[in-house]
Image: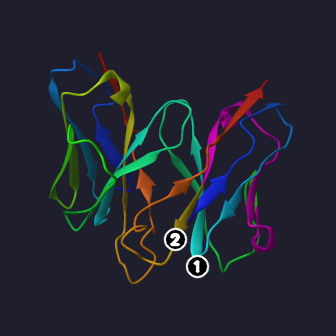
Amino acid sequence: AQKVTQAQTEISVVEKEDVTLDCVYETRDTTYYLFWYKQPPSGELVFLIRRNSFDEQNEISGRYSWNFQKSTSSFNFTITASQVVDSAVYFCALSEAEVTTDSWGKFQFGAGTQVVVTP
Amino acid sequence: DTEVTQTPKHLVMGMTNKKSLKCEQHMGHRAMYWYKQKAKKPPELMFVYSYEKLSINESVPSRFSPECPNSSLLNLHLHALQPEDSALYLCASSQDDRRFEYTYGYTFGSGTRLTVV
């Protein structure tokens, strides 16, 4: 069974501080995909990154960076020099790569972490 | 066009009403999904369509009736809903090729906020 744990319910920071969001996952599959999505108050889920289980390279995109540690089943997300526009709920999600009747098309989402950035 | 468009953005309906939510994409995606999201919770999968055929129904009550009339359009017909059905309803689409990475290009719409009174 798949499980994604985002232990931090809410993180509050002051603008320009760095913030790291933790994501720990469980899966029996050897091939899987991990995602991060941002959900601002307007509601849409904004895709941030997709990483397959064979690619353990860390990634940086502007102020965003991701640290994938397969040995600890973690896929953490850091926002550097946070801004007020970063205030949102961030979801980590897992999707199996092997197609089965039960799993196909499904994401297992974590509970989400609310990030509040104040000026 | 790299978007999933959902209409309406907001909907208020009575428990005896019949209404429909609409979702449209023109990315050539052949898999489309409906999710339900309650406040402060992650999205929960309701239905999956693949090549216009229903592939997964996550034990959703029959008062929710999905329809996929063509490869670009996905509807969710609502009838006799309960106040607890009030939520954000998200549509998503993705490329569907079971040989490869079926979650490639997975894109969510901005959702319909539904209030049942």
Q: Position of residue B26 (x, y in %)?
A: 28, 58
Instruction: Using the image, tell me which numbered label, if any, was put on residue B32.
Output: none
Position of residue B14 in the picture relative to residue B101 (left or right): left
Q: Marks 1 and 2: in contact by CB < 8 Å?
A: yes
Position of residue B24 in the picture relative to residue B93 (left or right): left
Q: Position of residue A55 (x, y in %)?
A: 68, 78
- Chain on which label 1 sits: A
Task: Tell me, yes or no, whether dots 2 and 1 are on the same chain.
Answer: yes
Report if residue A89 lies within the magenta region.
Answer: yes
Instruction: Using the image, tell me which numbered label, if any, was put on residue A31.
Output: 1
Callout 1 amino acid: Thr
Q: Tell me where the magenta segment starts and ends, as one range.
A: A67-92
Quarter occupied by the N terminus of chain B: bottom left
Secondary element at tag 1: loop
Position of residue B54 in the picture relative to residue A63 (left or right): left
Q: Position of residue B10 (x, y in %)?
A: 33, 26
Query: What residue sits right under mark 2 in the picture?
Result: A96
Q: Is residue A99 visible?
A: yes
Callout 2 amino acid: Glu
Report if residue A117 lies within the magenta region.
Answer: no
Q: Residue at x 48, y 35 (%)?
A: A43
> For residue B48, which quarter of the picture?
bottom left
Q: Residue at x 52, y 65 (%)?
A: A95
Colour theme: rainbow
Q: Residue at x 29, y 15 (%)?
A: B117
